[in-house]
Amino acid sequence: MPLSKIQTIGNQVIPNLGRRNLVINGSMTNWQRGTSFSTNVYGCDRWKFYAPGSHANTRSTDTPDSPNNFKYSNSCGGSGDATGITQFIESGNCVHVPTSGSTKVILSFYLKHTTNSGTAKITSVVGTMNVADTSGATTNRSTQNHNTTTSWARYTHEMSGADLTAAATNGLQVTIKHNGSGTTLFLVTGVQLEIAEAATDYERQLGKDELEDCKRYFQRISGLRQGAYSPCMIAYSTSAVQGTLHLQNPMFSTPSITLEGAGMKVEDGGNAYTSTSTAVSGQKGSENHLNWWIGGFSGLTDNNAYYAYGDDANHYIDLSAEL
């Protein structure tokens, strides 16, 4: 869990050890869902994209020249006001955030505004959830406009515990968006939200650790085969199978399951079957494991063991526990 803030003792600045950035995947490193999106969806891990029109959200290798050596940025394009990205931060990661007084909370990010840059053309917003860990309704607590150019620059947005109010314990919302009409395109990376007296260098994480954090909210599972002819599904009729997923990365909450591809495929070692259904029939479980089932098959043997598989990259299941 992130620690409190940068401490100053005498003439020494002593940084807290551990996590100080409340934002996950601020370096835009992880893209489990893909690298190009044309609708209002989660694209880059933990970042939900929104645009009123002409949606274009992609991973870019255009990054700022800085000691951080970012690998990717998040390219956000669209038409109209409010084109941008949002991250919701769960309440458990906000318990140490000041909810009153003058202690500073600072949002910083690197941004390059290639289309429609200028005075007050980018807005950053930090808000709170009205109900703990529920992103459906939020309240903006601190808003700042930024003057942008077509070159990379780092921007900062300061607020205090008094600005955030006691509602910060419900969880936070961080948004970076276009402010104005017309078509826009901007790239952003190195997003950091910290408790500090001044913005500090972007905090880097080990790649595996940041991916583990992302998988708390979303996991994509492909190639469901669990070893040669090792059963992972059991038929409970001639047309439906059920199975259990034990998650190596426990999720924030019980995830929803989405089946991607032209129907689930199962084998029993000699025969292959494809479901005509493109949706999971049902599920139950917890953040650690899931029982799920799907119909639409023909010719299965009731109570027979099968294993599921994907014959190409287009067959997988998505587990989502986004706030």
Image (cartoon, rainbow, N blue to C red):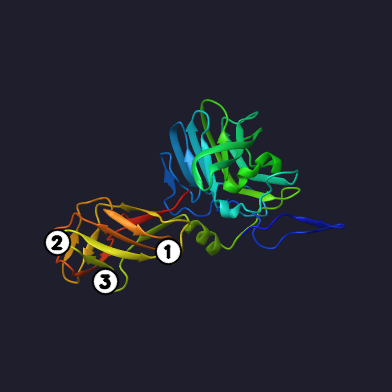
Asked where in the image residue 311 lies, by quadrant, the reply is bottom left
Marks 3/2 in contact by CB < 8 Å: the verdict is no
Quadrant location of residue 300?
bottom left
The mark found on residue 288 in the picture is 1
Q: Are marks 2 and 1 in contact (CB under 8 Å)?
A: no
Question: Regarding mark 1 in the picture, which secondary structure is present there?
Answer: loop
Residue occupying image coordinates x 45% and y 56%: 253
Q: Position of residue 206 (x, y in %)?
A: 58, 63
Is label 3 or label 1 in front?
1
First reached walking from the N terminus: tag 2 or tag 1: 2
What crowding class fits label 3: few (fewer than 14 Cα within 10 Å), some (14-19), or many (20 or more)?
Answer: some
Q: Is residue 228 above or below residue 215?
A: below
Figure label count: 3
**Hey, what amino acid is under mark 1?**
Asn
Residue in view at x 45 percent, y 46 percent: 42
Residue 291: x, y in percent? 32, 62
Q: Nearer the viewer, mark 3 or mark 2?
A: 2
Mark 2 and mark 1: span between their CA atoms? Answer: 29 Å
One can see residue 256 in this view: yes
Q: Residue furthest top?
A: 181
**Disc number placed over residue 238 in the picture, else none:** 2
- Residue on which the image places disc 3: 231
From this view, report whether residue 15 is shown above or below residue 191: below
Q: Which of 111 and 277 is in front in this view?
A: 277
